Image (cartoon, grey):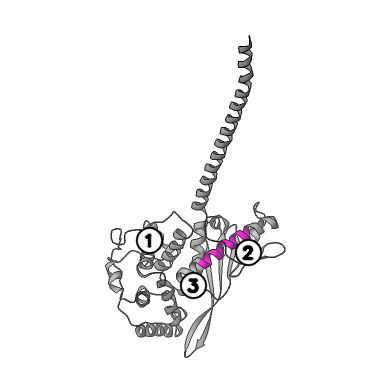
Amino acid sequence: MKKPNQRNNYSAPIAILLLIALLFAGCAALEEAQQRKQERTRRQQQERYVTFERPDTEIEASSDSLTLTSEHYTFTFADDLLTHADYDEPEERQNVGKGALLFMESLYNYVHDIFGFEPKHQLMVNLRQTHHGSTNLATTSTRTQTIYQNGEWLKVVEGIEMDFPVAMFNQRDVRAHELTHAFTNIYLLPTWFAEGIAVLVQVEYARGKSHRRLGLYEELKTDLDGRNAVQYWKGHLSADQLTQWRYSYSYSIVAELKNRFGEDFYPTLFRLIEADQLHQRLHGEMTTSFLVYYLSQAAGQDLIPFFRELKFQVQQLTKSEILSTIMQANQEHLGR
C-alpha cells in the first residue's frame, strides 16, 4: 500500500517542474518573438528612415512654435495649417519642426560632403496645407540682387525660400529631392544635371525607391533629331511618357561620374564654377556644353567624347569662349 503513495508523492514535484519548464519555454519563445519583432521593426525603419548620425545643432522655437530655426534653416508653419489636426497645438508643431530640422541639417551635411554646396544664407522652408492650390507642388525661389562689378553685371544671392505642401513634405525621399534643389538652383545648371543630383540624394540618402540606375548605353533614348532625350528636358513642366526615364537616366549619369572620378570630383566642379563666377554671370540656364567644359576640368580629362557617345549635342569650348559668349548675351539682354 505504500508504493502507490510514494508514486503520488513524486508526481507533484514532477508536475511542478514540468510547469516551470513550460513557463520558461514560453517566456523564451515570447522573448524570441519580441526580438524578431524588434529586428523586423528595425529593418523597416532602416528602409523608411535615414540612419545618419543626428547632426550637432541647436534648435530654437518661437513661443507659439510657428517658427523654428537651426544653423542653416528657418522652418515656418503657414497659417493654413493652424486648423489642421496634426499642427493646431504648439507642442505638436514643435515636435514636427524639430524632427524636420534634424533631417534637413543631416541632409545639408550629406549634400555638402558630396557636392561642396554651402549657401551663404539661411534656407527658408515654409510648410503649408496647399501651395498655389495644390498638394503636389513644391517651389524653390532664389532671391537675387544684380550688382555692377569690374565692368560687368553679376547676380548675388540674397536668400532662398522653399514652399512645401505637407503631403509632399511627409514623403521623406521626396522631401530630400526637393530640398536639394535649394542648392542646385543657385548654379543655374541644365535641368537634367540638377534633377540628376536631386535624384541621387533622393535614392542614396533618403533610400527612395522611385528611381533606379539605368545602363547609359543599353537604355539610352533619343529625340526625333537623334539627341539624348534628357539634354533639352524642361523638368516637370514638360511631363510626358519619358519623364520617369529622364529622372532615372539623369541620375545614372551623375552617379556614373561620381563613381568614375571619386569623392572630390563634384566639390572640385563647383569650386571651379564659383571661381569663374559662372553662375553669377549667366542670365539663364547653363548650356550642357558649358557644363561639360567644367566637368572635364574637374575630371582632368576631356569628357566631350563621353557625352557625344551618349548622343549629347555638345561643343568643344575654351573658358574664354564661354565667358565671352555669356558677356555678349548679357549685353544683348541689357540692350533690349
First in residue order: circle 1 vs circle 2: 2
Q: In whole angstroms, how far apart are the C-alphas of marks 2 and 3?
A: 23 Å
Secondary structure of the residue carrying tag 1 is helix
Secondary structure of the residue carrying tag 2 is strand
Question: What amino acid does circle 2 point to?
Answer: Thr
From the image, tell me which residue sits under label 1: 246
Question: What amino acid does circle 1 point to?
Answer: Arg
Q: In whole angstroms, how far apart are the C-alphas of marks 3 and 1?
A: 24 Å
Span highlighted in magenta in the image = 96-109
Question: What amino acid does circle 3 point to?
Answer: Phe
Secondary structure of the residue carrying tag 3 is loop
Toward the right, the furthest residue is: 63
Q: Which mark is residue 117?
A: 3
| Label 3 vs label 1, nearer the camera | 3
For this rendering, which residue is in front, 17 or 64? 17
First in residue order: circle 3 vs circle 1: 3
- Answer whether residue 131 is visible to the viewer in this image: no
From the image, tell me which residue sits under label 2: 76
Q: Residue at x 48, y 69 (%)?
A: 113
Mark 2 vs 3: CB contact within 8 A: no
Label 2 CA crowd tier, 10 Å (few <14, some 14–19, many 20+)? many
| Label 2 vs label 3, nearer the camera | 3
- Answer whether residue 308 is visible to the viewer in this image: yes
Q: Is residue 65 magenta?
A: no
Residue 291 at x, y percent in the picture: 38, 74
Q: In whole angstroms, how far apart are the C-alphas of marks 1 and 2?
A: 33 Å
Q: Residue at x 56, y 41 (%)?
A: 34
First in residue order: circle 2 vs circle 3: 2
Label 3 CA crowd tier, 10 Å (few <14, some 14–19, many 20+)? many
